[in-house]
Amino acid sequence: MIRRRPLILSTVALLAALAGCASAPSAPPAVPRVAVMSAFQPELVLLRQKLQDAHTTRINGVEFHTGTLEGRPVLLFLSGISMTNATMNTQLALDRFPVSHIVFSGIAGGVNPQLSIGDVTVPAQWGQYLELLMAREVAPGRYEPPPFIKDATLPNFGFMFPRPVEFRSAAQPQVTRRFWFEADPGMLAAARNLKVDLAACAAGTCLKHPPRLVVGGNGVSGQAFMDNKAFREYTFDTFHANVLDMETAAVGMVAHANGVPYLAFRSLSDLAGGGEGANEMGTFMRLAADNSAKVLLAFLAQWKP
């Protein structure tokens, strides 16, 4: 009997521990949050000021702020500038937090000549316009793709031929190639109902035209700061783009791969090389960033997912 006592006591202790685990309350489910993203700090200033009940977590050097905006649970963070940072940190957020939707707020270069600095655009779809084939010159000024590349069908700019990107997801595991990644239709429809007062002056400099909200159309993204009149005109003619930036199409691709609805708000800080003088971003960056953030905040306040 003495030799069996430790075994009996161990069994009793184990049963007691299991009983305690069974009776312990389960952890509450994580709160689904809207990921609110910007690329770099000036775009986040107004949103960070408006964030309530903020708590910050740092992962891989990225600060993720949980809290509420307009009463809605959000995850606020910077993607970092350009396509690789945006891809990497969007996926990081989706892997570590319960994200239900993604919205992006920031500045952009204007491509559509009908738009003006300060305008806020909400494109219906985004493409990666600098996913390219650099073609061989086969005669002076004439370039041709290799015969085995069949998807370089969009008009070229010299030796540069745009191509779709390779894509797959859990819902679509087979490899496909696509150019456009559509914004969520319901979120886009909600944006069409917004009425927001947009700023027209910054640091004593006022715009020639009162800014307006433009919902729909196309946006393109690529890993280059664009300040070239000829390439701007090509981008508008080829992609019918309203704006271009360096992140949104990458975020859209990650959103589609994970089955997460997304929408982007981008305000024109400059004309991507189409202006009369030097690039305008240094003058109007803060005005554009705040105009975009104002529209996003109005969206969060009124949107009913």
Image (cartoon, rainbow, N blue to C red):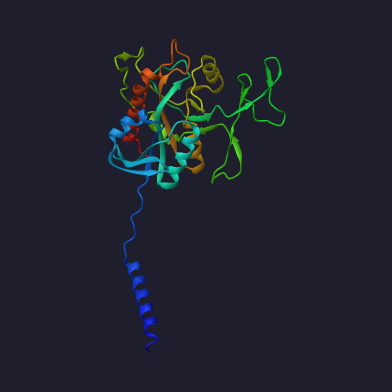
User: Can you see residue 220?
Assistant: yes
In the picture, measured across the screen, residue 196 lies left or right of residue 161, that is: left
In the picture, measured across the screen, residue 41 lies left or right of residue 185, that is: left
Q: Residue at x 45, y 34 (%)?
A: 185
In this view, 7 is above or below 28: below
Taking depth in this image into account, of 274 and 71 the one nearest to the observer is: 274
Q: Could you tell me residue 304's position as x and y percent?
A: 35, 38
Q: Residue at x 71, y 28 (%)?
A: 146
In this view, 171 is above or below 211: below
Q: Quadrant of residue 156?
A: top right
Q: Could you tell me residue 270's position as x and y percent?
A: 42, 18
Q: Residue at x 36, y 26 (%)?
A: 289
User: Can you see residue 193?
Assistant: no
Q: Could you tell me residue 231's position as x and y percent?
A: 54, 18
In the picture, measured across the screen, residue 64 lies left or right of residue 229, that is: left
Q: The C terminus appears in which quarter of the rendering?
A: top left
Taking depth in this image into account, of 29 and 212 the one nearest to the observer is: 29
